[in-house]
Image (cartoon, rainbow, N blue to C red):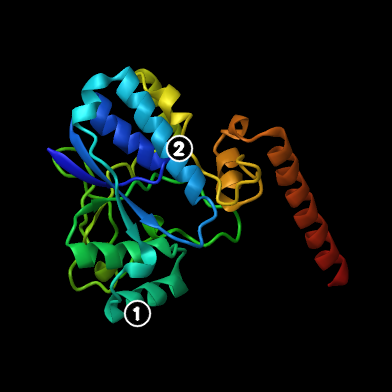
Amino acid sequence: MQHHLLWTSGWDSTFRLLDLLVVKRHSVQPYYLLDSSRRSTYAELRAMTRIREKVFDQYPYTKELLLKTKFFEVSSLQPNERISQVYHQTKQKIHIGAQYEWLALFTEEHQIKLEISVEKGLPKLKNEKPDWAEVFIEGHIITDLSPEGELINKLAATSVIYELFKYFEFPIIKMTKLDCGEYATKHNFRNMMELTWFCHFPIDDQPCGSCAACKQTIRYGFAYRIPFRGKMRYHLYNFKQLIKQLIKKLLK
């Protein structure tokens, strides 16, 4: 069985990759969309190389299962007015990243059923927008499991959001990052999970500590993955935000 997987070298997609290769022993065709404006691209590509080398060394049978990653430029994607319109409409209601527009354009163009490794998030903080995976959209929500235990798209074809999600599968959306870590430890590939990359704006090839991904990493209990200087930036950012809030209260 072959799986078409979006692999970014992040915690979630790498977890899915390693589970398929090491535990399930399924073939995986990874995909990566190259975005020239993404500052973390080099770090992600380097992490993917390290993970490949490590999994091949530790589990030699995966050499036959893990295919070469297929790369596509975001700038070369064929435009689709309907998809872009739906994306911008949806963005007004809920938090949804720009990558979902790219991925919808990509899967529509190539007619690929693509696995997207979105995990179950933590409860939202005060004033945070709800995430698309946590709300009902057009009266539907992606919650049903297939007999194989993998999440499948149950959105009605009449739903507006269907144009974005019709080619996606969400196999780990019922798991948290901590669940993934525990599972990886149990199945002896946690060491490879530590090679994953998450920071959006690396400084000197290390996580910055202040971008959204770094802050999420700390919030999930993985602060040990942030270097000392990154932690200092994180606390400095929080201190500045606190001062701004106090000033606003005083000016009311």
Q: Secondary structure at mark 1?
A: helix
Answer with mark 1 or mark 2, whichever residue precedes in sequence: 2
Q: Residue at the spot x=40%, y=46% of the render?
A: 8
Q: Decide if residue 135 is on the left or right side of residue 56.
A: right
Q: Decide if residue 121 is on the left or right side of residue 210.
A: left
Q: Quadrant of residue 132?
A: bottom left
**Percent position of residue 131, x then y:** 44, 58
> Which mark is on residue 85?
1
Q: Residue at the spot x=37%, y=27% of the render?
A: 53
**Percent position of residue 169, x then y:** 24, 51
Callout 2 crowding tier (Cα within 10 Å): few <14, some 14–19, many ≥20? many
From the viewer's perspective, is residue 11 above or below residue 134? above
Amino acid type at circle 1 is Gln
Q: Which residue in the protein does label 2 denote?
A: 47
**Percent position of residue 57, x then y:** 33, 20
Amino acid type at circle 2 is Ala
